[in-house]
Image (spheres, helix red, strand yellow):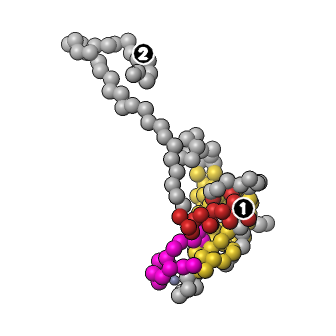
């Protein structure tokens, strides 16, 4: 089964061998994966209630956002959920200007866009997300930022929060 039309003008080597094509095939598939109990609750709270939920270590009392089952410092299971503010402090950022294929859509990413690290109030760890600022002059580590939620129905993903805006 040919996947493309061969437009080559030369079909043989100078000494008479046919120029061959190796077809590696066509691969396309849908896929999904289970989020597990922690991320299921986390994403459902973002989607349904437009809020971030962290989880608190019973030993060191650090609050993780996003949640995880076990504290990486104390190695104990965590089960105490705490609602976090949707405001926090910008800890770092990267303004991306080089387009590449978005694995979620298969389309080229629209650039520029800004990936950020943010620590929400009430949390002790940083989360990754996006800022709507794309000019270095308008963004600085230490700035206060606030979540901007998508309109309902929000997606079941981190994109339930569209991006973080700077609190002026
Ligand atoms: Zn701990």
* SS majority, magenta: loop
- Which contiguous range is marked in magenta? 65-79
Residue 83 located left or right of residue 107: right
The foreground one among 52 and 110 is 52
Q: Position of residue 55 (x, y in %)?
A: 60, 76
The foreground one among 19 and 2 is 2
> Is 74 covered by the magenta stretch?
yes
Question: Counting other residues with Cα less than 10 Å from the Cα at mark 1, is it few (<14), some (14-19), or many (20 or more)?
Answer: some
Q: Give the mark nearest the N terminus, 2 or 1.
A: 2
Q: Which residue is drawn at 44% across and 18% down?
A: 5
Q: Is mark 1 on a helix, strand or loop?
A: helix
Which residue is label 2 attached to?
7
For the residues labelled 2 and 1, the Cα–Cα distance comes to 53 Å
- From this viewpoint, is residue 63 visible? no
In the picture, which quadrant includes the C terminus? bottom right
Which residue is label 1 attached to?
48
Q: Nearer the viewer, mark 2 or mark 1?
A: 1
- From this viewpoint, is residue 66 visible? yes
Residue 33 located left or right of residue 89: left
Q: For residue 70, which numbered disc appears in the image?
A: none
Residue lying at the far bottom of the rendered structure: 59
Q: Position of residue 155 (x, y in %)?
A: 67, 53
Q: Residue at x 57, y 47 (%)?
A: 104
Q: Residue at x 51, y 74 (%)?
A: 69
Q: Is mark 2 on a helix, strand or loop?
A: loop
Q: Position of residue 161 (x, y in %)?
A: 69, 59
């Amino acid at each position: 089964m040919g996947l493309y039309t061969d437009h080559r003008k030369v079909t043989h080597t100078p000494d008479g061998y046919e120029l061959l094509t190796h077809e590696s095939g066509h691969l396309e598939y849908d896929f999904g994966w289970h989020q597990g109990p922690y991320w299921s609750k986390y994403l459902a709270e973002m989607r349904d209630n437009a809020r971030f939920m962290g989880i608190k270590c019973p030993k060191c009392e650090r609050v993780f956002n996003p949640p995880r089952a076990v504290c990486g410092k104390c190695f104990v299971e965590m089960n105490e959920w705490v609602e976090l503010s949707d405001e926090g402090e910008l800890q770092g950022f990267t303004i991306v200007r080089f387009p590449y294929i978005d694995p979620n859509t298969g389309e080229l990413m629209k650039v520029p866009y800004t990936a950020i690290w943010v620590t929400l109030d009430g949390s002790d760890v940083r989360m990754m997300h996006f800022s709507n600022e794309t000019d270095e002059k308008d963004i600085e580590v230490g700035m206060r930022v606030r979540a901007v939620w998508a309109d309902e129905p929000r997606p079941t993903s981190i994109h339930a929060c569209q991006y973080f805006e700077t609190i002026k």
